[in-house]
Amino acid sequence: MSETGTWALIHAVARSLIDHADELTELDRAIGDGDHGINMKRGAEAVLAKADSLAARPLAALLHQCGMTLVMTVGGASGPLYGTLLLELGKALQAQPEPPDRTSLAAALGQAVLAVKARGRSDAGQKTLLDVLVPLQQALAGDQPLVTLGSLALAAAEATTPMLARRGRASFLGERSIGHMDPGARSSALMVVALLAALPTATTDPGLTP
Amino acid sequence: MTVGIVIVSHSPKVAEGTADMVRQMVGTMVPLAWCGGDGQGGLGSEVGAIVSAIEAAWSDDGVAVLVDLGGAAMQAEMAIELLDEERRARVQICEAPLVEGAVIAATEASGGSELAAVRAMAEQLSP
C-alpha cells in the first residue's frame, strides 16, 4: 500500500474514534467510569499528530509506534489493552512480507488477541472488547468475505448488551451491567468498520494526498 | 537500602494520602513515590507517570508497586515492561488493597526484607 493509502487508513480509524467519543463515553458512564470516549479520543489525536511520519514507516513499525502512542496517552484499561493489541500485531507481522496476506494477518491477529486475553486476564463472553476481537479473528481466519467483517464486528458489539460483565469496573455492578453495550466492544467494532470502509479507497486511489 | 514502594491510584489525592500514611509508619527509611491522575487534572492513570515513580523510588533491592483499580494494574504492568530488562525483573505488583498493602509492604521493607517477602506480606496480611 502507498504512503498516502496508509495515511488515509490511520485517519479513518482515528477520526471514527474522535467522532464517536461522546457515544463511547455515554456507554462507559452507564457501566464504568465514563471516560472511554475521552481516553480513546486522546489516543486517536496523539496518533493523528504523528500520522505523516507513521504512514512512511513499514507496517510492523507503524503498528508498534501506534501501540506505544496508545500506551503512553490512553488512560484506564483501554491504553494497555489496545496498546498490547497493536504492539503484538506489529511484532507478529515483523517477519512477514509486506503487504501481509490474509493468512498471515489472521495469524498475527490471533497472536495479538492472545496477548490481550493475557493482559486483561479475560476471554470472550465476559463483556469486553474480546467479544468483538475473538469472532473477528475467527472470521478472518476462515473464508468469510472481508466486506462482511464490519457488520460482524458491529453485531458482536451489540451482542455484549445482554451479557453479565465479569471483568473491569462493570463487573462491580453485577446484574445491573446487563442491558448495556460494552464500550470497549463498541470502540473495537467502530475501528474495524472504519478500517474496512477506508480500505478500498486507500488501496486503489492514487490521487489521495495527505 | 531497602525495597522501594510505589503507590498508583486513579486519584492523586488518594495516592498522596496513602504515601502520607506510609511515611507516618516508616519515615524516610524506605524509598517511596506515588502517582495518580490523568496528567490533566482528572482522575486516571498514566504509564509514563508510573515509570517515573518507579525510577524515583528505585532501589537495587527492587520496587513493590501497589495499585488501586484494574486499569491502574494494567497500566503498571505496561510500565514495568517498558523498563530496562535488568530492572524489569526487580519490580513486582502486589495484589493487595492500596492503603493496607502500601503500609504493610513499606513496614516489611523497612525491616530489610527482600522483594518477594515484602510482596508476600502485603498480599497475606491485607484484608
Image: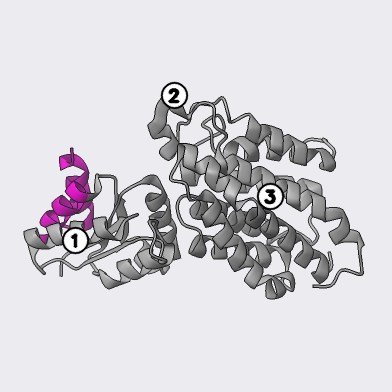
Residue A114 vertical placement versus B27 (above, below): above
Q: Is there any visible trace of residue A24 in the rendered image?
A: yes
Q: Chain of mark 3?
A: A
Q: Amino acid at mark 1?
A: Ala
Secondary structure beneath dot 1 equals: helix
Q: Residue at x 35, y 46 (%)?
A: B69
Does B88 appear in magenta?
no
Which mark is drawn over residue B19?
A: 1
Q: Position of residue B43 (x, y in %)?
A: 38, 56
Which residue is tagged 2?
Answer: A175
Residue B108 lies in magenta, yes or no?
yes
Q: Tell me the residue that label 3 is attached to.
A: A191
Left or right of B34, for residue A155: right
- Magenta region, residue range: B99-127
Mark 1 vs mark 2: in front: 2
Task: Establish if B68 lies above or below A45.
Answer: above
